[in-house]
Image: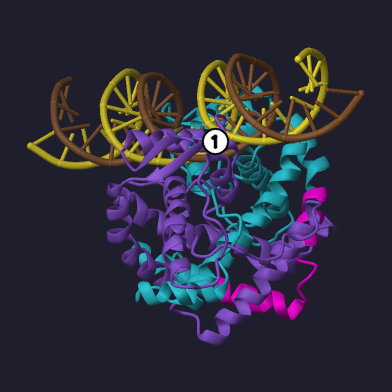
Chain colours: A purple, B cyan, C brown, D yellow
Amino acid sequence: MPLLLLKDLPRYECLLESAKEFPDLDPSAAEAYLHLLRAGDDAFGISQRNLDAHGISQGRFCVLMLLWRSVHLAATELAGAKPCGDGPRTPAELAEGANVTRATMTGLIDTLERDGFVKREPDPVDRRMLSVRLTAKAERFLHDFLPGHFRTTARIMTTLSESERKTLVRLLTKISTQAAEMVGGPAPVAAEPCLNAL
Amino acid sequence: MPLLLLKDLPRYECLLESAKEFPDLDPSAAEAYLHLLRAGDDAFGISQRNLDAHGISQGRFCVLMLLWRSVHLAATELAGAKPCGDGPRTPAELAEGANVTRATMTGLIDTLERDGFVKREPDPVDRRMLSVRLTAKAERFLHDFLPGHFRTTARIMTTLSESERKTLVRLLTKISTQAAEMVGGPAPVAAEPCLNAL
DNA sequence: GGCAGACAGTTAGGTGGCTAACGATGATTG
DNA sequence: CAATCATCGTTAGCCACCTAACTGTCTGCC
């Protein structure tokens, strides 16, 4: 769990108390904010435990999923499905998809290659570029790992009904949109890629 | 943003598609899970930007808030308010409050001390222990920084009405409770501490 | 008294984030 | 054609997280 967070959230009355000293503190907003980070971290931690048990980190898993999507897409596209976007192949595309810098992706690919999950191959056309491919070992790993991973994430949400899930997604989307607005760029709305599910 | 995450979330139809291949994949659960991590990361990133602009990291800020709470509590307790819990003082207590290991806390206190925000003092009674205190510089920093921080977190939530915030907190609490159950321990219910608002 | 065990803080070594700067290659354009 | 600019991947160095092992100190029980 890379996210350093407070263990216990403050009681609502304490927020109210603090708001007297800090007029800028909006108690209900702060409460929602803290619970969002807390719950996100909790859910993240659960899936992290799963990954740890299989000796793979979140970052590495993310790269594997992005690459696996490429393979998967190629297959479904043959079946005539509308393409969900090209699968990433190069380190730069992977960095973009995983939302990290290219330097970080270099490090991730280093360790994945060291552990035999991935291979770097030179691009025949543009000699600046590389192509990153999954090894058979990685495909076996994903095939074994994913079902349990999906069960775990499903279990985190078992306490919510279908309509509660819809409501949650609606509220969270509002927050993400607002956040995107705050960083400057005009809302990177939705998604074109397919199963980059983690 | 220490949390490595996918940039774009998969479309719902793509989740449905993938569910055909993986019966364990519950599309609405996966959707909720992904949006939760996405929104949590977005909100976290916004406040991170704020901290970066002031040259302080999330981890360091967390420690400052825990220590500042001690001071704050001492003050309000004089005023007869019911105590919201003892403020953490020792590295071990701080590690517990910030949800990191003692080793990590050593590193955080190292850099905070180096930058003059904090001082280590020997405990007069138990020579194993230290007491960590805020310096005047840190108090000045927090006094200047917090109002803007509170405005930022409030702004993230401006898109939600009061009742939406209540709903969100309710759903997120359910998730946190479920997550706590899954890690083993019986739900670390709520919070005693006061303003460890981040 | 003395020794085993518990506990506080640190150290060492690994991972995964970041920025900044680099060399190599490709694209643009005067 | 050559200079410039953009882009790709990497490197170097920082920070913050982890686990495991260590040192020093207290506690408790023969």
Q: Is residue B50 magenta?
A: no
Residue C7 position in % (x across, y down): 35, 39
| In front of the other: A83 or B98 | A83
Residue position marked by numbered label 1 in the rendering: A125
| In front of the other: B4 or B113 | B4
Residue C20 position in % (x across, y down): 70, 23
Compared to A175, does B48 lie above or below?
Answer: above
Residue range highlighted in magenta: B147-172
**Residue located 51% across and 75% down the image:** B174
| In front of the other: D4 or B56 | D4
Instruction: Specify the quadrant of the image occupied by residue A143.
Output: bottom left
Compared to B93, does D25 lie above or below?
Answer: above
- Could you tell me which secondary element the residue under label 1 belongs to? loop
Instruction: Please state which amino acid type lies under the numbered disc 1.
Output: Val
Residue A46 visible in the snapshot: yes
Quadrant of the rendering where the N terminus of chain B is positioned:
top right
Report the predominant secondary structure element of the magenta stretch. helix
Instruction: Specify the quadrant of the image occupied by residue B143.
Output: top right
Compared to B146, does D6 lie above or below?
Answer: above
Residue B191 visible in the snapshot: no
Q: Is residue B155 magenta?
A: yes
Residue B187 position in % (x across, y down): 42, 68
Q: Say few, some or many: other residues with alpha carbon within 10 Å of mark 1 (under 14 / 14 to 19 / 20 or more).
A: few
Residue A77 lies left or right of residue A175; in this view the side is: left
Residue C14 position in % (x across, y down): 37, 30
Chain letter for the residue marked with disc 1 in the picture: A
Residue B155 lies left or right of residue B106; in this view the side is: right
Instruction: Specify the quadrant of the image occupied by residue D12.
Output: top right
**Residue located 60% across and 38% down the image:** A101
